[in-house]
Image (cartoon, rainbow, N blue to C red):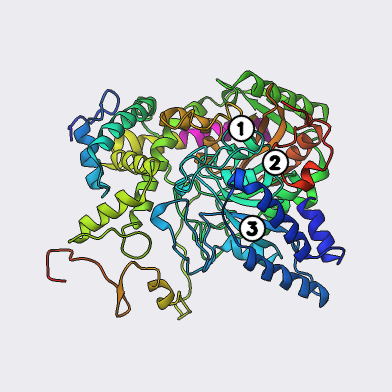
Amino acid sequence: MSQNTEAHGARLTREDAAYVARLARIDLTEEELDLYAGQLAAVLDHAAQVAALATSGVEPTAHPLPLRNVLRDDEVRPSLDSEEVLAQAPLAEDGRFRVPPILGEAP
Amino acid sequence: MSASAIAAAVRSGQTSARYTLEEHLEAIDSCDGELHAFLSVLDERARAEAAEIDRRVAAGEDPGPLAGVPVAVKDNLCTRGVATTCASRILEGWLPPYDATVVKRLRGAGAVIVGKTNLDEFAMGSSTENSAFGPTRNPHDPRRVPGGSSGGSAAAVAAGLVPLALGSDTGGSIRQPAALCGVVGMKPTYGTVSRYGLVAFASSLDQVGPFARTVADAAVLFEVIGGHDPCDSTSLDRPAPLCTSRLDEGVTAMRVGVVSELLDGVDRAVAKRVHEAADALAAAGASVEECSVPEVRYALPAYYLLAPAEASSNLARYDGVRYGLRVGASDAESMNSASRAAGFGAEVKRRIMLGTYALSAGYYDAYYGQAQKVRTLIIGAFARAYEHADVLLGATTPTTAFELGSKVDDPLSMYLSDVCTVPSNLSGHPAMTVPFGTDDLGLPVGVQVLAPALEETTMFRAAAVLEAAAPAASLPRICSPSMSGQTSPGSSER
């Protein structure tokens, strides 16, 4: 990925698109990479008007409401039925979700 | 028949929920082949629900303000044991283990849920063309889009297949399709309607809201679904504003600001209707002034950084592990990447990529951080505008319904459909669209009313006056037999 941190003027390259696709865990074909690199660059050009605004001293807004922690009493309550939940999994075993090896260990 | 009229007739025993349901199922049967508003029609379940309503009425009980009213629900709202696809291959066949709070509240008010409606995949789009299961058509012209992302809900209500429907609005996904289909659509104040069971797109922007053919029906549905929910930590700990009882209070001395930025670049025919709407409010006693909210110009580019950023994080959950599609591979990461490649459509991939990029090292401050600051500027600009106005007025959409396929190859031009609606999502404020006449082709035009946080009551009062003053609408070309049997003064062949 190019190290240009200036948003305006940066041009999203095909290599950038491939890197982002890997970060996002989406296998893309060569054709998709070509298509998305061009389309994303066009959207980012449009977004450059935001990047170019003077905002020093402006606080960011992450959320329209003042967020606060919401706690409930620590008492046991019924939760989702685990059989019903596991029935929706692609693979389940002994009350757990089954997945392929994560760190190369034997399944 | 309006939802309120149906509920009154069912409650009084004048008609039955079963009979009402059958009428609507027949309309769906005759129209939805062409319209494709529904992804699933729950006829057997709905019949059982309707029979239960009738049993309760017969036993002297009151099922509630939506007794026997058939309602359609956007297919990104969870329904226990009933497929909830988000119009995505990645969730095809998934049966949620719980109901969304709004779905429970519908049933609690006596509504009968008749089906799940089509949408742009994961609510990402402005035309419903991004559905993995095919597009919905605009009932006013089947060559045109119904808008999106809640295009199925908008089309179903416009065509008379249901009197009410639920949608979700992240950047205009209720208001834009409502405007393009000629119905009322409303986005509530952020936090007034529970998001529990709404499949997340951009959590700081998403809000569930009503579609209806009348302002009064929209108010009834808003009151049914609104109010605090302990299952949603962003739900406001207060009741939703009351609207139905104050609809008729008029707009005498109400201060209305017509926002010039919400008319910039808007088609002439649409802008003309907004000015006529402003005149109608003035004639009804409001004090109307032009005003400027300059920062609104930056809402669209800011939105198209913030919403994809939140989406890229929210959609990380579709990894082939706990639910949905899995494409087999020898290790977990390859399985994740292959499942997501096979399960997501083009627009969802594009937005995840865009959001991932905006959040990635080296770009976070310039894009995501900067867009968050612009959000602050927009909130401040609205606050200044509301020092001089009780409600603001503008276009809902820059154009009337466009033709299918006309924008699918140019994402940016599609995104520009949302230019008038995204500001209210960034600010968290309520906004609604009211049908107000047509363009030269007879296509519906919507006028948008915006209000400060929790001022839904005032917004609905203005909307009711606009509805009463609206020029005649044209009858949809595709619509239920009961609707086409009515004489509509404005209906004419195009």
Q: Nearer the viewer, mark 3 or mark 2?
A: 3
Image coordinates of residue A43 in percent, x first then y, are 37, 30
Task: Examine the rendered structure and indicate whether residue B347 appears above or below residue B99.
Answer: above
Q: Residues within 10 Å of mark 1 (few under 14, many from 20)?
A: many
Magenta region, residue range: B376-393
Q: Which residue is mark 3?
A: B225
Residue sticking out furthest to the left: A105
Q: Earlier in the sequence, mark 3 or mark 2?
A: 3
Q: Is residue B415 magenta?
A: no
> What residue do we see at 46% from left, 54% from top?
A67
Q: Earlier in the sequence, mark 1 or mark 2?
A: 1
Rendering quarter of residue B325: bottom left
> What residue do we see at 21% from left, 65% from top?
A100
Q: Badges 1 and 2: C-beta atoms under 8 Å apart?
A: no
Q: What is the quadrant of the C terminus of chain B in the image? A: top right
Q: Which residue is mark 1?
A: B396
